[in-house]
Image: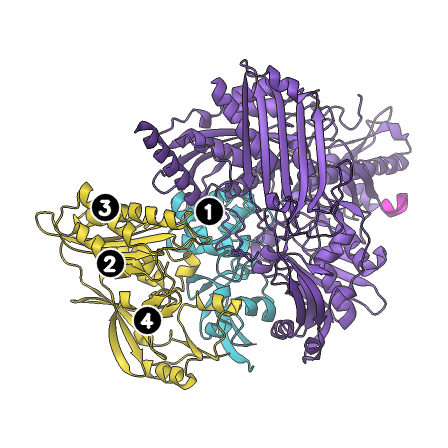
Amino acid sequence: MAKHHVTTTINGDPVEFLCTPAQTLLDVLRDVLYLTGSKEGCASGDCGACSVMLDGRLVCSCLVLGVEAQGRSIETIEGMAHGDRLHPLQQKFLEHAALQCGVCTPGFLVAAKALLDRNPDPTETEVRYWLAGNLCRCTGYDKIVRAVLDAAAEMRGN
Amino acid sequence: MDYRSPGTVKEAVDLLAAHNGAAHVLAGGTDLLVKLRAGVVAPELVVDLKAIPQLRGIAADANGFRIGAATSCAEIGEHAALAAAWPGVVEALQLIGSTQIQGRASLGGNLCNASPAADSVPALIAAGAVCEVAGPGGERQVPVEKIVTGPGKTSLARGEFVVGFRLPKPRARSGDAYLRLIPRTEMDIAVVGVGVAMTLDAAGVCTHARVGLGAVAPTPLLVEDAAKALIGTRVDAAALAALAAATSAACKPIDDKRGTVAYRIKVAGVLARRTAQTALERARGSTTKATGR
Amino acid sequence: MNDPRTIGLTERKLKIVGTRPLRPDGVDKVTGRAKFGADLHVANMLIGKVLRSPHAHARIRSIDVSKAQALPGVKAVITSADLCDLPSEFIPAGEMMVNYRDMTRNVMAREKALYEGHAVAAVAATNEETAAQALKLIQVDYEVLPHVLDVAKAMEPDAPLLHEEMYTIGVEPKPAKPSNIAKRVEFALGDVAAGFAQADVVVEHEFTTVPVHQGYIEPHACLATVSEDGQAELWCTTQGQFIVRSFCAKLLGMELSKLRVTASEIGGGFGGKTVVYLEPLALALSRKSGHPVKMVMSRQEVFQASGPTSGAKIWVKIGASRAGRITAGEAVLKYQAGAFQGSPVQPGCMCAFAPYDLENVKVVGFDVVVNRPKVAAYRAPGGPIAEFAVESVIDEIAKRLGLDPIELRLKNAAKEGTKAAYGPKFGPIGLVQTLEAARSHANYRVPLKANQGRGVASGFWFNIGGDTCATLNLTEDGTVTLVAGTPDIGGSRASLAMMAAEELGIELEKVRPIIGDTSALGYNFLTGGSRVTFSSGMAVVEAARDMVRQLRERAAKIWEIPLDDVVWEDGCARALGSRSSEIKPLSLADIAKTAGKTGGPIVGNAAINAQGAGPSLATHVVDVEVDPETGKVTILRYLAVQDAGKAVHPSYVEGQMQGGAVQGIGWALNEEYIYDENGRLQNPGFLDYRIPVCSDVPMIDTVIVEVPNPRHPYGVRGVGETPIVPPMAAIANAVESAIGIRFTELPMSPPRVLAAIDAKLASQSKTAA
């Protein structure tokens, strides 16, 4: 099967790649571009470990075809820190011990950032429902939710 | 498998016709990619509809609303006027999957994937939504309840696809609502889903009603007996009980990994009552916040 | 006993242990840089895929791989012929035993396919699509056989037989016919008949649980490279790189030192990654093809073919006096092992009544094979099932006696000196403290409304020690690298570095911990059994004390004073004695700088078999609300109280308590394997295998109790497993309190709950009529 040539933007940088029509954006990120921060937990949109931003929308990259990235703008976990400055969410996750094995963490961070970018002052319930598409088996979610709320407070300047 | 992204309805129709059933349309991809990965479908060609302007966006006019069939649920949910006019439809479509799924999933996909449990469909049925369908034979309008004919099957002819959804402008003193039962609080396919839309007259008597029911039959249902239980009443406890009974009676469910026959029948009645109560509050003018849970 | 390792434990002022610093490996994990099992790519690598049986039970008559082999892009195809057939030999893997004869058959079927998803062949090809195509070209001739999925049915005399040579062990005389019952075990103390005769109240119930999966978010993944001279490197997500080396070397007929196994970061394990599935296959494919081979399981494969824990039938009978003393406890546990023997029924028997001080106990267990994937350890393997049943009956006893459930447990709680039914006398343990802390917690006094209920349950887990090595290397600038051998599954690099820094008296940031591969250290038993903070911690402390002795020796040499006149304090060597005022202390950095001149590199080593792991006891309190019209159970409030001995890093101890509690909530309410009548799994994905999502649970309140374990230099007890033991009973007890219905079957999913509510209403109206 002939490959498609795709031109896109990832974390602000112009990127070109070749992929088959069957390859998902997650396959491309991980196996073509070696951006392995986004994880495959289920390949069916049920776990959120592959979460990325696509044109400003939170999506599961396992449910987007690589060819659909043409002309779009993608943000992954690799673009969340700026130089050596962690995003407040990343910092709060560390402070609150909101990760144990860490495999779900990139997905949670991307999803939480998407929440705070649109709702800077969410309630605990709003956080929990927004993040319902991100599965964690290690933490029981408690410290994750606390970290997100604390990051939101810091970002509001509280 | 190849991929094309046409810019017009005509191009899409031509592509589908050229592949004579071996091509599949793509909107949000949240159902199609799962099927591709599982090997359930293996099309020669995927036709991406998202570059076609008619398939995207929401327009409001004097007659109501028009929603492009490939518009993401996230985008639809942000339309303030639509959420105010049809809170039941909006809360239903916002229950599809997770936030991530919402970023891509569309009404066209949710309907034409033809799962009996699709969340948006009972609410669209209750709202009286009509589909604009395009195909080799031209364009036609189809009430949404006539699209799904069985699990995974639609009444669309080969090469046809849904281009848009029309919702009427709600009458005065109208309200709609959607509730579903799932074992967890999110992420599950509905075990039962109920959409209710009703209109009251100035005296508080119900003059119009529609009830959509999902996940309890091979297709989503328009339950006319359930609507009749409400029309002409003040939607009091007796009417709600009759509604519940009629809804339960309409169920033709199966035992599956998500629920049993007995459970679905019982809960359909319970949800019908609860959904109607929310629709009633909205019809009376309260702004009950959409949750759908 | 004057154990020099624990002298001064309570008087010692700790600077780092007990605080909450940032974990040293954390930045890589929040930036996506950390490499998990599937994150490695190497040049020339092939993709491996497995062909799996579609049948729950079938004889394999033949396998024809010729068409697959001929497909362009396919570089190797393997079947069981490419792995060693091994004789029966049991070895420990974590807290379970594995058998080599069974293991070689589980990773690749030989005579029979014993469950849907059982690996039958595997291919390695230049890309994933070609590998998938190749699988379709392999022709397997199956003779489909009747299958059995249920433990009770499998025990019946005419049940379909999985293994023709299985004669129940532990039964005298040896049975004449083979069966699906691999083993019978028994633990007893005193005289249960006499105990029941003394009881004023006797309650008995039968319980049923179904298999649940560990549910780690990261599927199994590995990358194997075998060189032409037979040396091999394996990168894999695992709880034990040394265990993987042992298993793979055995299955491939390799010498151990030729196989170097590196543990990637691990995306969850909970016991499920203490065994091998893809690793021997990837090695065999690499050996055959001459290329590196990468293999990753899909989520469907994880559910179909990697170990869940057992489903079980449990019968429990408990008798108590009116005063609230339990006079006898009896149980029969029937656990399904999956396709090969080795369910955790034995630890289940041992734990069932362990929280209590009983004179008369008898527990009998059966290990039964069924046509399902072979079970693997799942967090306190065997314990949650048994204790679900016992804690439910204890609750019933409390109700019958009109006693508060915590009160009843306090009257019977095991303490220091209690003899457990499974043998040992307990050292200091903290059950009483957890019960008292639960009782005095604000959660215990929140007023409840209609359809709400509160449930209590306690839990016990043994915890293990085992073979552990650790090395501390002093660099030339006085910083320290720490090499541990137990994969970090929950933040243990932090606690290990903290103990090292505490011992050395230096800042935490000066210690950089890594997890070494199998060539970097002596043998380490795997991460499991809640043993890492205990065992690797003990080894790290010993290595640090070894380093401190060497540092003192170097200072003594430099100062030309006796060794006894040198102490190590606050990260420095200080001189005692007559010249103490004139001698300036030497820091770690000072001594490091001149190490080459004073004797060479300074390395602290430890190679131990850590003994004295202390059990961890817990008490959980949960409030639920039941919707009587839909059967949905909502968790309103959850409190987990647990004895950690000493919480080295309290945040990570809390994390274990919270994570285990939420796994238990899923087990109680929604998780189950659903099979059709052909023995095919209907829900091999996260859509219909329903683990708790973020909105399903509230904050999990925690209280850490510390009853130090005198056998560990910091008093540490393992904490990882106990948290999953109480939740199911606590929730069942809460539901009973809310709606007056005792659930003896898990999960308590909405259809089951509603059916029970409706049945109760129906029988009540019948009685009333």
Question: Is residue C638 among what the camera can see?
Answer: yes
The residue tagged with tag 3: helix, strand or loop?
helix
- Amino acid on which the number 3 mark rests in the picture: Gln
Mark 3 to mark 2: distance in Å? 15 Å
- Amino acid on which the number 4 mark rests in the picture: Arg
Closer to the camera: disc 4 or disc 2?
A: 2
- Amino acid on which the number 1 mark rests in the picture: Cys
Q: Nearer the viewer, residue C670 or C547?
A: C670
What hue does chain B carry in this figure? Answer: yellow
What hue does chain A carry in this figure? Answer: cyan
Do tags 1 and 4 sit on the same chain?
Answer: no
Closer to the camera: disc 1 or disc 2?
A: 2
Residue identifier under label 3: B277
Q: Is residue C599 magenta?
A: yes
Residue identifier under label 4: B56
Residue identifier under label 2: B126
| x then y, percent, for residue C24 | 64, 47
The answer to which of marks 4 and 2 sits earlier in the sequence is 4
Give yes or no for contact between labels 4 and 2 (Cβ–Cβ under 8 Å): no
Give yes or no for contact between labels 1 and 4 (Cβ–Cβ under 8 Å): no
| x then y, percent, for residue C462 | 68, 33
Residue identifier under label 1: C694
Q: Quadrant of the C terminus of chain C?
A: top left
What hue does chain C carry in this figure? Answer: purple
The residue tagged with tag 1: helix, strand or loop?
helix
Q: Which residues are magenta?
A: C595-600
Give yes or no for contact between labels 3 and 1 (Cβ–Cβ under 8 Å): no
Do tags 3 and 1 sit on the same chain?
Answer: no
